[in-house]
Image: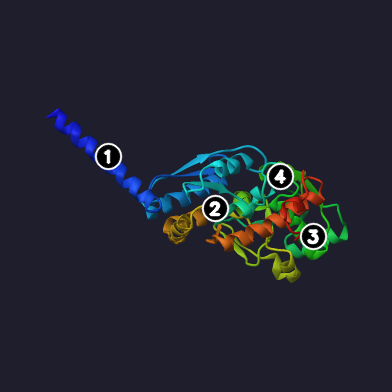
Amino acid sequence: MKKIYLMTAMVMGATLALGTTLAQAAGKYPARDITTAVVWGAGGGTDVCNRTIMAEMSKVLGTNINVINKTGGVAGSIGMNYAKKQAADGYTLVGLSESNVTSAVQGGFTDKFTKVWHPFIVGGSPDVISVTPSTGIKNFKDLIAAAKAKPGTIKACASGAGSIHHLNLLAVEDGTGAKFHFVPYKGSAPCQNAALTGEMNVVVTSVAEQQQLIKGKKFIPVAMLVPDAFTIGGFGTIPSAFADFPKLSKFLPIMQAIGFAIRNDAPAEAKKVLGDAFAKAMASDALKKFAASKYYVLSGKHGKDAQKVFDSLESQFTWKLHELGAAKYSPAKFGIPKP
């Protein structure tokens, strides 16, 4: 009897293996599990975003998507290089964000971003410019007037030079004629902590990062750096900076682009199947709840539409780093056009 069971198991195993082999040979995708390598740490915004979208896409695809973390390097270069070195068969994705576009000019990656990647953008949390209560400033107009009256004296912080938050502050200056005393920090949290201790007067970070401090009245949000007003539950609505300074539309918005990517040279069928699954996942209740809880604005762009977004971000980020002397290589080396 045991021999019969053993033979039956062997036959079933061989049948399953043959089915998988035939599916792969016929070009059916996916025929096995997919792996997503997130370039940033576990528990961070990019990681949580990827785990959420992958869980929904897994349901649509009918296969497991295993999310791992490959952190370190320059601007997420270890994770990107890991994914680039895997077979271009659609079974290794990379979880990333807009910050990865600076990796090449900083010496961590060898190619222009969209030369390698076919991206999918879930979304991101928009930036808000806030002041500390001690400034006595209540709205964006007053902040700009104060900055113009005493150029370079109002201390404004964001994460490092060339970061998305720094670029947003520079866009505010370009669009309004104001001039702040910019102080870079290693991240949004240190910047916000400096404002809480009185070292800084103005903070430019995302709504997701500021929302608890806004609700606690530690920060006064004066304007959203996107075209539309934004409502924070438990606080109220923050007006758009565009309302008082429409010329900002020439420089803004510069939005986060958090999501994932597949190699450009992956099979067309894999890109199509992932695109269809992504669209269905983006429309799910789980993603809508995620966006609401994390104060995200959902995108849903992928393929060429998403590449246009990353091309624009790469151009703005890398050339600004170059101008600031913070880039190892000129963006021109990688064929990145000036913004």
Q: Secondary structure at mark 1?
A: helix
Q: What is the three-letter code of the residue carrying label 2?
A: Asp
Q: Which residue is mark 4?
A: 191
- The mark nearer the N terminus, 2 or 1, is 1
Split into 4 quadrants, where in the image is the C terminus?
Answer: bottom right
The numbered dot on residue 14 is 1
Give residue 197's position: percent from left, percent from top. Answer: 73, 42
- Identified at 60% across, 41% down, the residue is 81
Spatial separation of the CA atoms under disc 1 and disc 3: 66 Å
Give residue 104's position: percent from left, percent from top. Answer: 69, 46
- The mark nearer the N terminus, 4 or 2, is 4
In the image as oriented, which residue stretches furthest toward the right? Answer: 150
The answer to whether residue 99 is visible is yes
The numbered dot on residue 173 is 3
Q: Secondary structure at mark 3?
A: helix
- From this view, report whether residue 85 is shown above or below residue 227: above
Q: Which residue is mark 2?
A: 265
Q: What is the three-letter code of the residue carrying label 1?
A: Ala
Give residue 237's position: percent from left, percent from top. Answer: 61, 63
The answer to whether residue 122 is visible is no
